[in-house]
Amino acid sequence: MPEENVQIRVYAADALDEKSIRRLVSLVNGAYSRHRWLFPEDRTSYREFCEEIAGKELVLLLTEPAMEIVGTALIQPDEHSLYLGMAAIDLTRQGQGLGARLMKAVEEIARQRNLAKIKLITVRELGNVEYYRQKGFQVVSEQRQPAGTWGAVGPYWLATMEKKI
């Protein structure tokens, strides 16, 4: 996908309409569906998504001219860092550099807000630790999670990662 065909916008979660939220739920569940071998259930529901994003912001990747949502990440600033969560790219658009563009946008948001680092939590077994390491993140802690946590069919490692800006 050519770079000029995608816009990046930040929205207060409370400003999104029902149609947009339903699209985001579908996008997140689709992206997370690759991991059904460990997490057989959907990542979120409409109600859970609304609860999780309440009071936070979403970074959206929108195609032009239709302004279709093809990527998203939840962000929440605190005093010194920007938390990044629920990052997802539409399954049909993966491998086109959109994840990298999303990460660059999040980094730029952190810089603009004078935040010293970006923090995230990810599951080691999904391959995300290596992906984020390539983007400059480092593991700062890991915790073993038992089967059943977040609906997992087996145990897994939950890694907290940070990147200094």
Image (cartoon, rainbow, N blue to C red):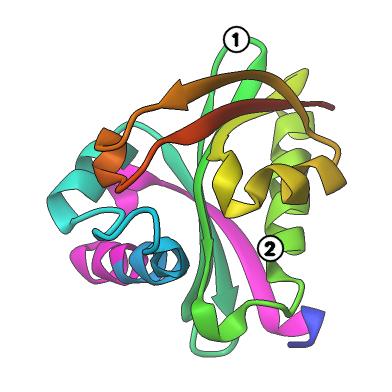
Query: Which residue was labeled with disc 1?
Result: 79
Q: Earlier in the sequence, mark 2 or mark 1?
A: 1
Quadrant of res 26: bottom left
Q: Which residues are magenta?
A: 4-25
Quadrant of res 160: top right
Q: Position of residue 129 (x, y in %)?
A: 69, 42
What is the total number of numbered labels drawn onto the structure image? 2
- Residue furthest to the left in view is 47
Residue at 17 percent across and 57 percent down: it is 46
Residue nearer the viewer, 82 or 125? 125
Q: Are marks 2 and 1 in contact (CB under 8 Å)?
A: no
Do we see residue 135 in this rendering?
no
- From this view, report whether residue 132 is shown above or below residue 143: below
Quadrant including the C terminus? top right
What amino acid type should be assigned to the residue bearing mark 1?
Glu
Query: Which residue was labeled with disc 2?
Result: 99
Cα–Cα gap, marks 2 and 1: 26 Å
Q: Which secondary structure, mark 1?
A: loop
Callout 1: 10 Å neighbours few (<14), some, many (20+)? few
Quadrant including the N terminus? bottom right
- From this view, report whether residue 21 is shown above or below residue 79: below
